Amino acid sequence: MRHRGFQSVGTLLTLLVSVLLVTPIPATGGDVQDDLKARRARLMERLGGDTLFVAFSAPLQVYSRDVEYEYRQDSNLWYLAGTDQEETILVLMPGNSARREILFISEPNPRREHWNGHLLTKSEARALTGIDTVYYTTEFEPFVTALMNGQPFDTPRQAVATDFDAYLAAVGRGQARVSLLFGRRPAPSAELPAIYEFARRMRDRFVGATMVDATPLVEGLRQVKTPYEQQVLRRSLEISSDAHRAGMQAAVPGAYEYEVEAAIERAYLANGAMSPGYPSIVGSGPNATVLHYNKSSRQMQAGDLLLVDAAANYKGLTGDITRTYPVSGRFTDAQKDIYGVVLDAQASGMRAVRAGGYPADVEQAVASAVRDGLLRLGLITDASGDQFRVWYTHGVCHFIGMDVHDAGDYKRPFEPGVAFVIEPGVYIREAALEMLPDTPENRAFIAAVRPTA
């Protein structure tokens, strides 16, 4: 079967958010402090008693000159401490007999708060995070220096303090570990992130201390959502779903893409989600086949498809919802056919999900359905190879949570509490054919699938 008007036919159908709901303990009153404490406790079980774990808040980012971007906390710190305040440091010391959790925050400053807003007091930080021991950020360096010199911090000289004995003994043996969140490794020619510079300074000054990457431990915990997180994520997706419906009401011929985006993001705020979970993508007509289109500037026309990829950040958690629909309110036959292929592929992916299975199982099930559907429509001539990837250009399964592409190990089996999406997309665009190498096989393929006048 052939299709006319390739540039007007571009569709992506997304989301199944699959939070596997076999978690044995239901979410109760939403006590975030208890959940934060439990997250930190699980991490400390994995760190070991000779470890000093340190997590830093994200730095401020300059938008232009003396204007900064809206602040976004580092996801791992947010996951463990629940605060979005900048200049915050979390320390965990699993071997301590007391003061196992320590938070460092900026000292309240009336002049600074006049310009930038309220800073947490120590009592407010305790209440927010559930961490009892709170110091100011200016005390962090003396704290680390004292420990690495075999001395307890914040203890009178004559007093007997045993809180830090396990770690101080490890320092004395030359076996102390400093556990940091290094994240993704930079390229050899790339500038080193600040955490690498901190690690280098620690190694240079404190002989015998070993630097350890805690990123896999923290991200492994983040991969399985707690009952509290599942409750918040469901609400986040409810808000996002309502926002998509508001956007649909604004999508009419003659309106602009930015009007749809504004309707969506207004619905977030109206329902208590204070920001998008990621930059919204609202693309009509030819823009619907641009994966990360971000201009939202085109005037929509009758006959266009509109692709909307948007979700809210609610209490730090975001889903990922993409929908494609006709601006005029009705699909053409060609648009409907391709939409059906994507919908069938998503259903195939859903059927492939099971506890103990893998994301690769979902990817294979979806790809097989897309191949069959495109062959049926005459958009490929061979379903046995990768010809279908001319129109099918990205994977379908990724985790969601604190980040839209959340932390997780794709080689780890699915288990109760994992949250992810299944988002197949088929993008029919003339440029995809023009980019193919000029070979006899490709010329035959193009002649077979290109629409005729």
Image: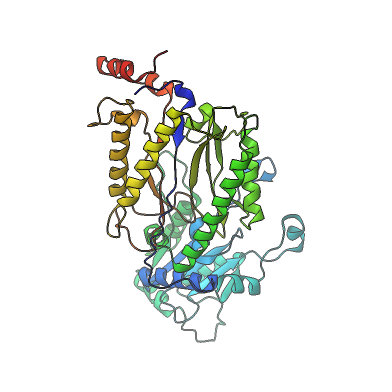
The residue located at (40%, 76%) in the rendering is 95
Nearest the viewer among 264 and 153 is 264
Vertical side of 308 occupied by 39: above or below: below
Judge whether residue 311 can be spotted in this image: yes
Nearest the viewer among 207 and 421 is 421
Residue 409 quadrant: bottom left
The residue located at (32%, 54%) in the rendering is 353
Q: Position of residue 313 (x, y in %)?
A: 56, 54
Q: Position of residue 146 (x, y in %)?
A: 51, 71
Q: Quadrant of the N terminus?
A: top left
Vertical side of 122 occupied by 299: above or below: above
Q: Position of residue 414 (x, y in %)?
A: 32, 58
Judge whether residue 73 can be spotted in this image: no
Residue 303 quadrant: top right
The residue located at (44%, 72%) in the rendering is 26
The residue located at (48%, 48%) in the rendering is 320
Vertical side of 153 occupied by 212: above or below: above
Please count the marks in the image: 0
Q: Position of residue 169 (x, y in %)?
A: 38, 76
Nearest the viewer among 274 and 267 is 267
Q: Quadrant of the C terminus?
A: top left
